[in-house]
Amino acid sequence: MKPRDGRRRVVIEDVTPQVDAGTFPIRRICGDDVVVSAAVFADGHDHLAARVLYRHESETEWRFVQMQELKEDVWTANFVADQIGGWRFTVTGWVDHFATWSSDFAKRVAAQDQAECAEDLAATQDVALALSTGAILIREGSKRAQGDDARRLTEIAQKFETLANARKSSYENPCDDELQQLMARYPDVTHATRYKMELPLWVDRERAQFSSWYELFPRSASPVSGRHGTLGDVEQQLPEIAEMGFDVVYLPPIHPIGRAFRKGPNNMTVAPPGAPGSPWAIGDTTAVNYASVGAAVAGDCGGHKSIHPMLGTFADFERLVKSARLRGVDVALDIAFQCSPDHPWVKDHPDWFVRRPDGSIQYAENPPKKYQDIYPLNFESDDWRGLWDELYSVFEFWIERGVHIFRVDNPHTKALPFWEWCLGEVRSRYPDVIFLAEAFTRPHVMYGLAKRGFTQSYTYFTWRNSKPELQSYLEEITRPPVSDFFRPNFWPNTPDILHKSLQDGGRPAFMHRLILAATLVSNYGIYGPAYELAENAAATPPAGRSESEEYLDSEKYEIRQRDRNRPDSLVPLIAALNRIRRENRALQSNASLHFHSIDNPNLICYSKATPGFENTILAVVNIDSFNEQIGWTSLDLDRLGFSPNEKLLVEDLLTGAQYTWRDRNYVALRPGVQPAHIFRVTRLQ
Amino acid sequence: MKPRDGRRRVVIEDVTPQVDAGTFPIRRICGDDVVVSAAVFADGHDHLAARVLYRHESETEWRFVQMQELKEDVWTANFVADQIGGWRFTVTGWVDHFATWSSDFAKRVAAQDQAECAEDLAATQDVALALSTGAILIREGSKRAQGDDARRLTEIAQKFETLANARKSSYENPCDDELQQLMARYPDVTHATRYKMELPLWVDRERAQFSSWYELFPRSASPVSGRHGTLGDVEQQLPEIAEMGFDVVYLPPIHPIGRAFRKGPNNMTVAPPGAPGSPWAIGDTTAVNYASVGAAVAGDCGGHKSIHPMLGTFADFERLVKSARLRGVDVALDIAFQCSPDHPWVKDHPDWFVRRPDGSIQYAENPPKKYQDIYPLNFESDDWRGLWDELYSVFEFWIERGVHIFRVDNPHTKALPFWEWCLGEVRSRYPDVIFLAEAFTRPHVMYGLAKRGFTQSYTYFTWRNSKPELQSYLEEITRPPVSDFFRPNFWPNTPDILHKSLQDGGRPAFMHRLILAATLVSNYGIYGPAYELAENAAATPPAGRSESEEYLDSEKYEIRQRDRNRPDSLVPLIAALNRIRRENRALQSNASLHFHSIDNPNLICYSKATPGFENTILAVVNIDSFNEQIGWTSLDLDRLGFSPNEKLLVEDLLTGAQYTWRDRNYVALRPGVQPAHIFRVTRLQ
């Protein structure tokens, strides 16, 4: 078996970036420079040329950019991804006979000048013959060119022929920049090789990479003590949340809550009367229940396409979304694909669940533990197509109501091929939609979900507390191959996770964990107002365990009204951090994150910079919640855009203080008081 | 667009080994254990099962082996490649509902025993219901099973049903090993996932990985001074070469040598009358020339399918090959695809060459240097199909005359797609053929040739002389991904390369470079008798250079008769090394190569071992040709199969001396006298 054309001598390999050999797209945001590199080589010593071909899915023609040889056989070029959506790119390369000829010709002319008398004639003859070869190549080029270029090349070819026929005793080199450029514009690509595949790229809107999330429970949002909060109450809080600098307000599920096996405060198995239940137990309800307590009722309701009547109506919801949008804030909904026993799907589609031999539907369990308030969906259902369509329609339902960011609950308990399909479907119609995966699971599954289309993901940040843990984890997730498909979103707390370090460290711990989350990565979020108030009381550990990561009196099971503007609140620090993030582009992506040495295991030092060091941030954080820590830095000045021994001007964006720094600097940081420096680095004038 | 079956929940990724995402085969030798690993995972917490599927290209049915979970989500299994030729392998995985059920069931039974009185009934009811579920799964298994197994599973299912119906107050767990094994034998693979591709594997005969090459010029092989050597003379030397322990005798091109622009001694541009020329300038000749000097003449001859009449006839050649085979020795031919101006292809196929504007054929040149004795082939010829076929036929011609090993001259100046096709064609018909690439070129091209089918390759070993150079290079080429497609063959000298270190270091340098080549990698070779005699006189450097790597009075241009058994010959050392290589399986592959620390930059310490440490070799080599070097080792005992602090018995296979060693040992090695220890490591009795 022979290849179609054996004259394609160029080989193209090792094209980067790619995820799993092109199985999944690499991810970028709109406006990013996409840097492509490839090994491009052939037999022998001919000169080569190569291009990156790229196009948005809406374009039928390839655009291209010429590649440059970066080092031996490795070529590179960049293009700007100037539109959200799907892209393809690939690499093509060919033997550039004119470039080879031109380089050899220059050597011939030089040799002719240095030739001994005896060899003069032979050398000159070679030059004349080579000129004829050049004329042929240029004439072929003129046939590929158009208009003036074609005429000009024909002229040059004629000039070369005349020169060749002149049989002079010594030649000048007639090749000039004009000729090189003209010939480069019309290369002979007859035998060009194309890389074996087109690689996929997905371009998101900027918020996919740079976002600040604020999670709150609408039912706790009422300013009136004892009253069930509403979407309207959330709308009232929007100015304050936007003022703090958040651009995503994320609401736990807003659907009616199941009544069967409803959980009581502190996860009690039997709920006392009036207990509001967990918003993640999504169920059915009837008008009756809520009419009695004065809620706005939208008739028959239930399931993932309805709103809990105590929270409000669709009109309220749409007003909230609109009001948020006016402030540049996205409302993000939590999509939890699971059902309480009274969810309408249970009645309408019992085949979407596992049935037990006695005909009952299998509830969630981890023997011997039972979670009878939750029915998991069965992704091996014979009616998987019907199930997939219905789940997809949930996203579409809310997208049409203005929701363009979703936080997906426990995506790792739903089939991965479903996500690949569903997120692909959503993106093909609504390319600006962002999905945050609550994938607190094993690395392969967490990354598997990201590859299949989740825009952002929760991470292990919460459980990375020591300096080596933080550094090695950050280095893993902010560099290729991981950073090509995975975007971390750091949460120092969630309604499910109050980490031991916060329980023990209290307010000082809340401060430095917040600073780390907001400056180490460009996507972060907090669950408030528990965070602002540094709430650190944990629930009683479960039997047989010495620790719990659950909140005491968790808001998951009861309404908790609080005042985020209490005197000891962290609101000012949060607002400062969000302002610093907005004002410094260096903090709006992760690729440049670099850890610098500092001689104290409780001090962590890192920098981020824009590609040309137009904006450079250098942070030092004390990760000890109890003691002042002092240390000396050893900065890698090149990672800050400076030469060795150069001095830097650093301005602490938290305090306004300015210092002159070099590679070695003394630092002293006190927990709770000044736990960190966040410096903007500039050049001394 | 929906996948064919959305119920396939298992994801299979990161299958290793693979070369360039399955574009090229991984290489193994017959009898190798092929270790396959893969990330196999799914949503949720179900138990999974996975298999490696594999088959030789001659088989239509897959064989399979069950995979085991090595660490979180990473599964592995091995199979033995028991036949040379092409293989395919892939991975399949599925959710093992029976295993999930069985594991949950054990927990239920345990929980039932620990349950509080009040919960007894509920727990027992759960166990009974779970038994019914188990019965259903087992009954389904019985339908997939055959014969006795099917009957037995039906019996067990019935027993489970009876137990479930008994509604006992407490249950034993009726699952036993027999049931687990039966169910594992008949898994439900309805929704199994298959890895997206079948990965290629190529299995060579053992000599592809373990070979000792001896290169000699037949024309220098005559025992009679001044007489042109013959193939018969080579045959006479075979016992001696085999006695030294070599198993490949490699002959530079044995074809007629071109007369046009023939080179004289020391690469003189004009050859004096009677100069034999370079064997790599393959040309045409007529009977007349050689008849006059008494050579056996086979009529009209010339080109790559003929034998130089002064060397002998095809009958002589076949006798040589047969005689070698009787001694377990392969005769390897050098295939140099280039032509002198009087090669028959030039006359018959002028279109296989580049023509200059004056109609003449383009000779090789690197302006201003000219190599007018050589016409390179043009792989962009319009008749590339004809050219490819002819080149292929050269290999087939010699294969049919008993040659199953080829050394290919300068393969990097011929198109890579040609090699991919040509070597594939040869291998599909003659799977035992071995190709050694003389690819002294850039890394991408060198590796590109290996990926496209060269069995072994020359390397940069000659230019890696310091300890860090040797260690980092060896670590690159003996580990995946490189070792999956690239097999190094180390040559301390070749007719083209007499390295500065040998020129300066003389006999002691020849000793330690030989020891390194023979023990660092499993394929090595020397060019003799220049090597045995430590010939170190270099040619005058070319104009403008301070060094030459060419031999003085190079055998490439003249006949050089020598006595390899001179008193100072290295034959005894060579014979000892080849014996050690044959007797120690550790030295017959490279995967286990490990460098140990030793506190002297002129001492290099490394080990190789068989997978179970049945055979372990530890070497220490002094790479200084002039001075005794002493040092202390710090051995990684686990890489030798020993526990920390354990003592080892080491026996020097060069001297017979025995020592008791631990991790730290004193070593003193003298160049030229005892430049190395090659220890066999065993346990103290």
Image (cartoon, coloured by chain):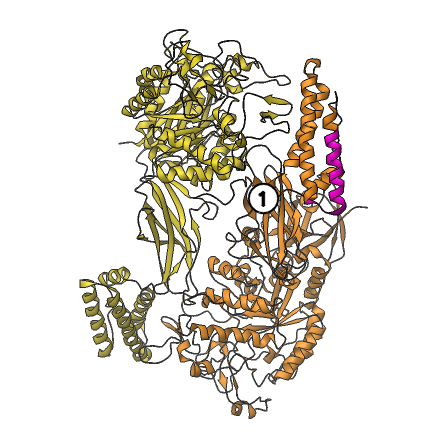
Chain colours: A yellow, B orange
Q: Is residue A374 left or right of residue A83?
A: right
Amino acid of disc 1: Ala
Residue B8 vertical position relative to residue B244 in the rendered view, above or below? above
Q: Residues within 10 Å of mark 1 (few under 14, many from 20)?
A: many
Which residue is drawn at the image coordinates 67% and 80% (left, top)? B319
Q: Quadrant of residue A573?
A: top left
Per the image, is B391 magenta?
A: no
- What residue would you read off at disc 1? B192
- The subunit carrying tag 1 is B
Q: Secondary structure at mark 1?
A: loop
Q: Is residue A647 visible in the rendered structure shown here?
A: no
Total marks shown come to: 1
Please state, as top left, top right, bottom left or bottom right, where the N terminus of chain B lies in the image: top left
Residue B682 at what x, y percent from top left?
A: 76, 49
Q: Name the residue nearer the viewer: A145 or A617.
A: A145
Left or right of A49, for residue B567: right
Q: Quadrant of residue A580?
A: top left
Whether residue A151 appears in this view of the structure is: yes
Q: Position of residue A588 (x, y in %)?
A: 35, 32
Residue B262, compared with residue B63, is above or below; it is below
Instruction: Write the start and end of the magenta stretch as one range.
Output: B144-162
| Secondary structure that dominates the magenta span | helix
Q: Is residue B148 magenta?
A: yes
Q: Position of residue B123 (x, y in %)?
A: 68, 20
Q: Position of residue B527 (x, y in %)?
A: 59, 69
Which residue is farthest right? B685
Quarter occupied by residue B136: top right
Q: Is residue B45 above or below residue B435?
A: above
